[in-house]
Image (cartoon, coloured by chain):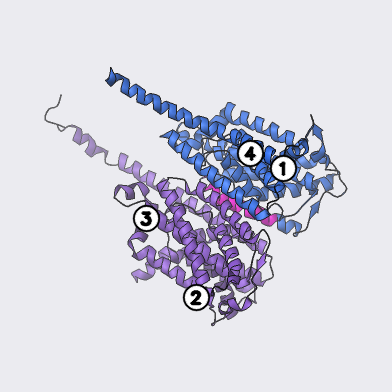
Amino acid sequence: MNAVRDVAGRYGIQMVILGLLICVLLVIAPDFVGENAAFAVLERLVPLGIITAGIAATMIIGELDLSVASMAAMSGASAIVLGGQGLGLVPLVALLTVGGLLVGAAQGWMVARAGISSLVLTVGTLILFRGVAWLVTDGVPVSLTNYAMTDPLLGRLGVLSPLSITALVVIAVIGVVLSRTRPGKEMYAVGGARQEALAAGVPLARPVVLAFAISGGCGALAGALSSLRSASATPDGFTTMLLLAVAAALVGGIGLRGGRGGMVNVLFGVAITATLAAGLASMGVKSYVSELVTGVLLLAVVAVDAGVTWLARRRELAEHRRTLTGPLPRRTALTHEPVSPVGS
Amino acid sequence: MTALAAPSERMGTATRRARGTAVVARFALPLLILLVVGVAAVTTPGFAEPTNFRAILINTAITGIAAVGMTAITLSGNFFSLGIGPTVILSGCLFLASADRFGAVLPAVLVTLAVVLLLGVVQAGVVAAGLDPIITTLAFGTIVYGVVAVRTGGEVVTAGATQITGLATTTVLGLPLPVVVFIGLTLLTTYLLQHTVVGRQMGLVGLNRDTARTSGISVLLTTTAAFAIMSVGAALAGIFSAAQLRQMQANDLPTLTMDIIAAVLVGGAAVAGGEASPARSALGALLLVTLSNVMLLQGLEPGVRVFCVGVVVVLLVLVLHLVRKAGAR
């Protein structure tokens, strides 16, 4: 019973939004039902779900990795260009993911050690990674010549596919790391109250490096898988992914100021935004319209969040005022007692 | 004697070092531009010609005008607007469409300025209410892009029979109008930010929002002023861009937002707020365009050019950031 209440309290808003969204879509998009609809939503876990998991990791420590979409573009372009080199599918994806992890870890190290604001650094690397994508593709769309290579990615098992299973496994692993391991808990400590965490002896470098490594690895994995699925990549790909991933994370309930939310929130956020996008796509609506709706949703969620913070602050202030004015008689009584034996 | 001299000596080196870093932060960019121009003039045929310098200035004008406007946002502690690219496209499309309807340039310019200013003021209100500026401008940018795409249906917008190219080709003192406006706007914004009460208050809010608020500075007023300056920059950039291209569509200028932010960052603005100079942002835009120009004349591939600009941005941003931290210590 308590567990039910706990889940409802933690994810209640997301459940209501998702339920309402599905009801609305059932009415306005009659084609969007059953196994095909579920498959269409789950296919959006690559790249959206993986990228959201990555950016959420940096949001949990109170930073923001703006470069994650460019990382996906860089890795996607590299995957297509390297795809013709005779490397197997799994080694190729693994290689790129490890590369992304290392680059991300380097970013985290710079944020933690050199004290560079993550916004400054990742805006810079956003431009740099985009430049690498241009360098790798020479500024033109590239496509895979060896089509047989990506066949294993295109299978379908009921509502799942190898891609969506990979995404779910990755998100589950990150979830376990966050909630069950020491570095994961340090991430929450650093994000929730950095000064207090540092004073309590939490090393700053380890959780920050871990968070940016997760983000870099997720960006690279999502970009590689997504580009291999379509067997092509453009240097300008994934530009809208930053908005969609940030929106999914915030809608899911990841706190922008850090320390709040987990991978279940990521799954809810991705489920809501992906259902919205897939539902609208099934009605033949252009992708920029669903981005527009996502933008409005994002603004609404941030506004609600700000409103809740404001209310909590007011309540806290009122509480303070009450404690200050409330027990006055006892304080006046105290002043009659001698404060110290020395006295004046 | 030594006991007295030691601290003052230490203080001497400290102030000298602080002054040294200040000099680096202030003059690094102009010196770097001079270096690039000097090296390019010697090594690159076709670079040191009046027509090429003119082309560099014209190319800088659009990004530069928007970057100068963006500097106000950064100064006021609101990081940057991730929605400035779509806003520039909106003002370009709006300018072309209203020029077509009114049949004249001036009313179209005024309508565009008014709409973009209104958009900026609305965002300022939302941000001043306590919402995260980056997320807010990202969301607004997407909404603006979506609205432009829906309204135009993804089609190209033109000004019809109205003559608008005059805006881009008129010359004042031998310089094209966009360049003149770029220089004028840089001077005006510098004056506004550094010599008016609101401008100074903007910097104070950027330095320390809570302290500024307790000192009686209106965060709403300063944020509104910052977004208004940014909107004027975005509107002018869109108008001149539309006048140059004579057409515009929702998907134009995909790299604009990042070019503008890169210019501001290369200009050495403190991203957290409190320190930013429109003139240095303008020079930042000039440096990036000059670099691209040199590489183009050297016959480098587009991929290599974008990559090299990215490397330069990251290196400069990191160096300036570390220099500032060392100076503050």
Q: Tell me the element at label 4.
A: helix
- The circle drawn on residue A165 is 2
Q: Tell whether position A107 is magenta.
A: no
Q: Is residue A66 left or right of residue A333?
A: right
Q: Are marks 3 and 2 on the same chain?
A: yes
Span shown in magenta: B129-147
Residue B224 is situated, as x and y percent measured from the top left of the image, at 59, 39
Q: Quadrant of the N terminus of chain B?
A: top left
The reply to whether callout 4 and callout 2 are in contact (CB within 8 Å) is no
- The circle drawn on residue A162 is none
Q: Colour of chain A?
A: purple
Which numbered disc, 4 or 3, marks the residue closer to the eye?
4
Q: Amino acid at mark 4?
A: Val
Q: Nearer the viewer, residue B38 or B161?
A: B38
Q: Nearer the viewer, residue B118 or B234?
A: B234
Q: Tell me the element at label 2.
A: helix
Q: Nearer the viewer, residue A98 or B188?
A: A98
Label 3 crowd (10 A; few <14 / some 14-19 / many >=20): some
Residue B72 is situated, as x and y percent measured from the top left of the image, at 59, 37
Which residue is the site of mark 3?
A206
Q: Which chain is blue?
A: B
